[in-house]
Image: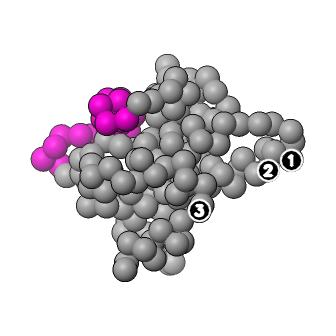
Amino acid sequence: MKRKKERQNLHPKIQNYGREILDHSSYKDMKNFKQHGNVSVHDHCLRVAETSLRINEKLKKLRMHLNEREMVRGALLHDYFLYDWHDKKNRLKLHGFYHPGHALKNAERDFDLTKREKNIIKTHMFPLTITKIPTHRESWVVSIADKWCSLVETLKMRKPS
Ligand SMILES: [Fe+2]
Ligand SMILES: [Fe+2]
């Protein structure tokens, strides 16, 4: 019942393009890892995919045509690193630098990825990962959507002073 409700709220394009990913058991594990505040990594990735679609609607008006399927799949997998990055025992202080590589490795193991989808995952932390420059429009959109969603999630954690 809960699952059905979750699906109903999901953008139809995310349901359609992301079906294979969303149904994967390892992908569902991301519900157990927190990203910012109370937001799980799973929900964060859904938000980034939704925000990317919203940005793309604006770009369409400027006659820019991006591949929505690859953009959504890349957004869903951009943080597919599958560990708790808050856990100090993991000694993952450089999580910001290394997690795109972990996410890409896991995503290549579990799914057949296009060149563009790999680029989205690998470069989403640019400019922190200064040598991993986005080379596709879809990668720029997901990288910006990720920064926006992370900012909102972080600000929501802070109590008003
Ligand atoms: Fe990330
Ligand atoms: Fe992210």
Q: Nearer the viewer, residue 86 or 136?
A: 136
Q: Quadrant of residue 72?
A: top right
Residue 58: mark: 2
Q: CA distance from mark 1 to mark 2?
A: 5 Å
Specify the label residue 61 is tagged with: 1
Q: Residue 96 location in percent, x, y?
A: 38, 39
Q: Secondary structure at mark 3?
A: loop
Pointer 3 residue: 11
* Residue 151 in view here: no
Name which residue lies at 31% across and 61% down.
31
Residues marked 2 and 3 touching at CB (< 8 Å) = no
Q: Which residue, as the protein is rendered here, is positioned at the far right?
A: 62
Separation of residues labelled 2 and 3 (CA atoms): 17 Å
Q: Residue at x 86, y 39 (%)?
A: 63
Residue 7 horizontal/vertical position (percent): 47, 68
Could you tell me if the residues under marks 1 and 2 are in contact, i.e. CB atoms within 8 Å?
yes
Q: For the residue with label 3, is its CB less than 8 Å from the closest atom of ligand 2?
A: no
